[in-house]
Amino acid sequence: QVQLVESGGGLVQPGGSLRLSCAASGIIFRMYDMDWYRQAPGKQRELVATISSGGSTNYADSVKGRFTISRDNAKNTVYLQMNSLKPEDTAVYYCHGHIRTIVIVGDYWGQGTQVTVSS
C-alpha cells in the first residue's frame, strides 16, 4: 500500500520558517519525481516546488529564494524548507509523487498539512 504522509505544518508569524516533511512508503522512492503543491481557500491547487529523481529542482516564482525542496532517498523523505513566510503562503500543502516509465506508472498524493502564516 502506497502512503505519502506529510508533517511539519502549523501556525507561524510572518517572516518565520517551517520545514515540511513527506515520508513515503510502498514505492521505490528514489525513482520518483516529487513535488509540493498548495491550495489556499477558494483557490486552485498550485505547484510550489519539484525535485526530480536525479535531484534537479524547480520553483514557482512566488517562492523562489525563500523555499528549498530537498530529498533524502535513504529515508524515503522529501522536505520543503520555507523561510521568510508571508500571509499569502497560507494554504494546505500537499506532497505528490509520480513516475512514468515503460515499466512503472505511478501518481500518488498525501493527505495535506495546514500552514497558516499570521500574526
Image (cartoon, rainbow, N blue to C red):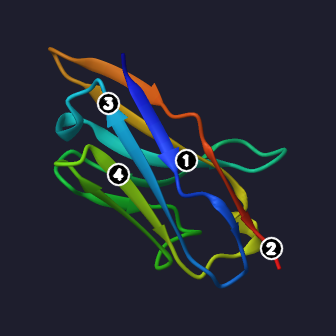
Ranked by sequence position, the earlier of labels 2 and 3 is: 3
Image quadrant where residue 103 sits: top left
Residue 27 screen position, x and y as percent:
26, 26
Callout 2–callout 3 Cβ contact below 8 Å: no
Above-or-below relation of 65 to 38: below
- Mark 2 and mark 3: Cα distance apart in space: 33 Å
Viewer-nearest of discs 3 and 4 = 3
Ranked by sequence position, the earlier of labels 3 and 4 is: 3
Quarter of the N terminus within the rendering: top left
Q: Check disc 1 and give the amino acid type.
A: Tyr
- Mark 3 and mark 4: Cα distance apart in space: 12 Å
Callout 3–callout 4 Cβ contact below 8 Å: no
Residue 89 screen position, x and y as percent:
68, 65
The numbered dot on residue 78 is 4
Q: Residues within 10 Å of mark 1 (few under 14, many from 20)?
A: some
Q: Which residue is mark 3?
A: 25
Quarter of the C terminus within the rendering: bottom right
Q: Which residue is mark 1?
A: 37
